[in-house]
């Protein structure tokens, strides 16, 4: 019987794809969850909290590979340091971490915490693999939904994204976890770059809604960084195949395919 693979964040957007793929590969899975859950179908749930350290030692005991997917708006560096200390004590043989493109270039607290988490992984003394990915379609959809509720949609000039499908990220992570530790691997981004106006406009179109859009300027270092495209991975990255339009067509309008020409028309309007 092989040792289980521990997945943090196994109940989240990414984890909900990763865990079934690991089970389909014949691996037993242990999930670190904040709340107790019933273990079943080859999935064991262990309650714990990465920020306060509770339950982590129990979660990593006897684990061969650890996929660290858990994350939040802040504190990822602290949580990861707590996790790698426990993993080192348990002699985990492969630590896989999902980070974000721009972790070392975007001057915002979330990205700095991700970079701190990367450094904790690399300095853990454990064999490791780190994948940086672009923002998921799911996150962009959440942002578009909130912005579309406003009577006038503010569109930050120069703010661009290259969103990627979370299922493609999950498949890549599982391949990495089942292989040998390789350090930092190529970034994974989506097939197209979009301005914020294009993304929100496509969402509005799919919903059959109209909203006026007002250009705004992002101030400070963060604004300059985004206008320079430091959150994008335009060269040397692995590129996913599933576009934002395909994601929307599935999630919001299964009987209607949004065409690239429609996307451009929405942006120009």
Image (spheres, rainbow, N blue to C red):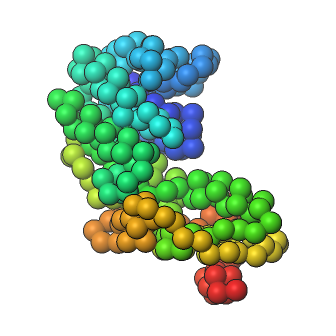
Q: Position of residue 227 (x, y in %)?
A: 43, 71
Looking at the figure, which quarter contains the N terminus? top left
Q: Residue at x 64, y 87 (%)?
A: 268
> In the rendered view, would you say 190 is above or below 27?
below
Q: Quadrant of residue 25?
A: top left
Question: Is 269 displayed left or right of 79 in the figure?
Answer: right
**Residue sitting at x 60%, y 16%:** 36
Query: Does residue 86 show up?
Result: yes
Identify the residue at image location x=50%, y=38%.
72
Residue positioned 41% across, 35% down in the render? 76
- Relative height, residue 246 to residue 104 (above, below): below
Report x, y in % for residue 198.
61, 75
Q: Is residue 50 left or right of residue 88?
A: right
- The reply to whether residue 256 is visible in this rendering is no
Point out residue 147 in the picture as x, y percentages from the top left corner: 70, 61
Looking at the figure, which quarter contains the C terminus? bottom right
Residue reaching furthest to the front: 220
* Above/below status of 132 relative to 77: below
Q: Nearer the viewer, residue 173 or 226?
A: 226
Using residue 5 as the reference point, say whether residue 147 is left or right of it. Answer: right
Residue 60 occupies which quadrant of the picture? top left
Q: Is residue 269 above or below residue 111?
A: below
């Amino acid at each position: 019987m092989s040792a289980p693979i521990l997945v943090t964040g196994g109940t989240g957007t990414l984890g909900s794809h990763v865990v079934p793929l690991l089970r389909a590969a014949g691996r037993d899975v242990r999930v670190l969850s904040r709340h107790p859950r019933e273990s079943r179908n080859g999935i064991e749930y262990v309650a714990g909290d990465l920020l306060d350290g509770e339950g982590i030692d129990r979660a990593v005991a006897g684990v061969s590979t650890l996929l660290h997917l858990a994350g939040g708006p802040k504190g990822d560096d602290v949580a990861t340091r707590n996790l790698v200390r426990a993993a080192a004590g348990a002699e985990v043989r492969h630590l896989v971490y999902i980070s974000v493109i721009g972790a070392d270039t975007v001057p915002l607290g979330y990205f700095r915490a991700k970079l701190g988490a990367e450094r904790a992984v690399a300095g853990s003394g454990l064999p490791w693999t780190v994948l940086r990915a672009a923002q998921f379609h799911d996150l962009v959809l959440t942002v578009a939904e909130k912005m579309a509720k406003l009577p006038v949609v503010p569109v930050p000039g120069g703010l661009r994204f290259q969103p990627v499908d979370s299922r493609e990220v999950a498949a890549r992570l599982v391949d990495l976890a089942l292989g040998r530790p390789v350090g930092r691997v190529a970034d994974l981004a989506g097939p197209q770059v979009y301005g914020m106006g294009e993304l929100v406009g496509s969402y509005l179109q799919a919903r059959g809604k109209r909203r006026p859009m007002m250009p705004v300027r992002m101030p400070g270092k963060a604004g300059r960084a985004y206008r320079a495209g430091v959150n994008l991975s335009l060269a040397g990255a692995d590129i996913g195949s599933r576009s934002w339009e395909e994601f929307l067509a599935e999630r919001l309008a299964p009987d209607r395919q949004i065409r690239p020409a429609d996307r451009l028309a929405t942006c120009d309007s």
